[in-house]
Amino acid sequence: TSAYSSPAKSLGDPGITPLSPSHIVKDSDAEDAVEQLFLVVVAIDFGTTSSGYAYSFTKEPECIHVMRRWEGGDPGVSNQKTPTTILLTPERKFHSFGYAARDFYHDLDPSESKHWLYFEKFKMKLHTTSNLTMETDLTAANGKKVKALEIFAYALQFFKEQALKELSDQAGSDFENTEVRWVITVPAIWKQPAKQFMRQAAYKAGMATPENPEQLIIALEPEAASIYCRKLRLHQMIELSSRAPVNGYSPSDTIGTGFTQAKEHVRRNRQSRTFLVENVIGEIWSELEEGDRYIVVDSGGGTVDMTVHQIRLPEGHLKELYKATGGPYGSLGVDYEFEKLLCKIFGEDFIEQFKIKRPAAWVDLMIAFESRKRAAAPDRTNPLNITLPFSFIDYYKKFRGHSVEHALRKSNVDFVKWSSQGMLRMSPDAMNALFKPTIDQIVQHLSDVFDKPEVTNVKFLFLVGGFAESPLLQQAVQSAFGSRCRVIIPQDVGLTILKGAVLFGLDPAVIKVRRSPLTYGVGVLNRFVEGKHPPEKLLVKDGTRWCTDVFDKFISADQSVALGETVTRSYTPAKPSQLVIVINIYSSEQDNVSFITESGVKKCGTLRLDLTGTDASVPNRREIKTLMQFGDTEIKAMAIDVATSKSVKVGIDFLNY
């Protein structure tokens, strides 16, 4: 038997049974809510490896301001984002975020640092945890556990305070949270619980409240990127295509030089953090016609997301053609390969111990690797040097009784040598080999997407996200797909999502059609039909034979849903005298679901309609209307007793069932 008992047998309520042939109502006036007027939209790109925010005043939507430069910063890494790292004091209170957290943690004496709680790259936990709840834990570098919700709320609260402070400094007076519409980006391939988790963390951080949920939009990363790419002008992107030289460069030059030029351009404008988004459709876009398709590949630190969009003219609205896919193929995979290489050379037992005993030095080593990782390129010939922290060399000698140099000689990893300046010297081939597994997975996944029937005739492939800065990834995508479509990279590729998220917050209606990631329905009773229904589902009540546990479908997985679309069904209590009506809502990743007891079906909401005290002159077949509204990343459900207009509402909840 399933984890859920039949609705019919539980609570002594006979449940509900469908009343009418189902119909879908397109409710245009369902949203009579007064559109709130916000003075500013602030978008937060909460990334696996780095995070940032950007904002725009609703009065001048063509100006997008990226957050101020932060203290700290790494050699060889120029970006306007800050590492997604957070430090809590030994008493578990918030201490610092970003470079500040990293540097402070690093400067602590090892005897002290083991009491402090340091977290990095923790966002992936939301993707990898299959049964995420409000109670899920995260593990700090010292092995201690803290509730994930607390860490995420601390991080969002930090960004909220930073942004409000910057806005207040600009405005010359205190800026109130109520004047801000917040947008937080999440990977499109995240499951619903993770998306809801982000919203709960934002409520805890005080960005919005369950009573006023419109103040916060959860945006999907590739959608945000897509919105920004529509605005691109030719001088704002680099085309990696074999078709024609760009600005007089042949394609082989562009991978290198286009970027050098772009970097120069960015460097000159480093002081200005304001980007003008011309209120036009960019040139690339003007080549797209009604019905044209393009793919956005958002490659970040943790995940790679792919979405296929189609243009709907005249206003250029976007329609999602194929549900978002992807996986954990972000640039973290490269770090993981580097760690495996270290284990191969120095022994897994040593690396595990070193991470626990010298956590700050381990962080140091990974920072050193990060800047060399960014120097990897397809045509590089000179080796890459990675400085080993002194405590690594020292601790290794204590641990093994021989030197790091000896380990390298003995390990016969021929690509990696020891240089007399105390560095690991990696040949370019060795570095490229670290990228290979991750890049292969991205290319393979993209090939699978290209083979889908919905994905024929793709005109452009936009490569965005932090990992898209890697020339190795650019080259791999270009050589695999350059013949099928034009591969385009926005110039400030790491900020694409951030800027798109701001544009989305200014005009959330730009995305018109999404694909539902799940099938949704409610549990009902149907009249039992011999031969059609399984005998074990038979329930006899007051002489009527019912089939229990029936899944009455509202919408199926991968079905197109227009934003704000409402699906309505009518039910009637199976027993006329019943006064409390309980409607359970279920979801499943499968398309065709017949019973709520099938595997993979999860309960994600309950509507309880209490009809006690209502007039007795109700018709004997009472009609209960049930509506589900599919919107944003949230879904709302409502039940109405037609005779008395009594109603009850609920948001679909994936974390608490």
Image (tube, helix red, strand yellow):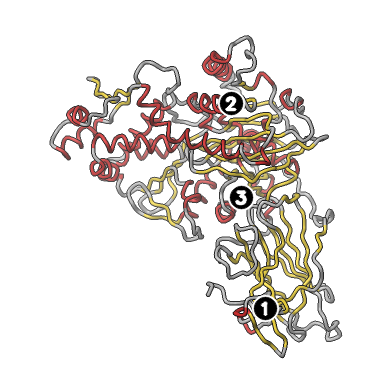
Going by the numbered disc 1, the residue's amino acid type is Cys
When the figure is inspected, residue 586 is found, relative to residue 433, above or below; the finding is below
- Tag 3: amino acid: Met
Mark 1 / mark 2, whichever is N-terminal: 2
In front: 442, or 375?
Answer: 442
Q: Which residue is mark 3?
A: 207
From the image, tell me which residue sits under label 2.
492
- Residue 602 occupies quadrant: bottom right
| Above/below status of 433 relative to 560 | above
Report the number of numbered marks: 3
Q: Residues within 10 Å of mark 3 (few under 14, many from 20)?
A: many
- Dot label at residue 560: none
Amino acid carrying label 2: it is Asp
Residue 547 has which mark?
1
Q: Nearer the viewer, mark 1 or mark 2?
A: 1
x, y (%) of residue 215? 68, 50
In this view, the residue farthest toward the left is 401
Q: Please report whichever mark, 2 or 3, sits nearer to the chain's N-terminal start.
A: 3
Q: Residues within 10 Å of mark 2 (few under 14, many from 20)?
A: some
One can see residue 204 in this view: no
Residue visible at 49% across and 59% down in the picture: 131
Q: Residues within 10 Å of mark 1 (few under 14, many from 20)?
A: many
Q: Is residue 109 visible?
A: yes
The residue sitting at the top extreme is: 248
Q: Residue 71: where, in percent of width, then height?
A: 47, 31
Q: Secondary structure at mark 2?
A: loop
Looking at the rendered image, the quarter that the C terminus falls into is bottom right
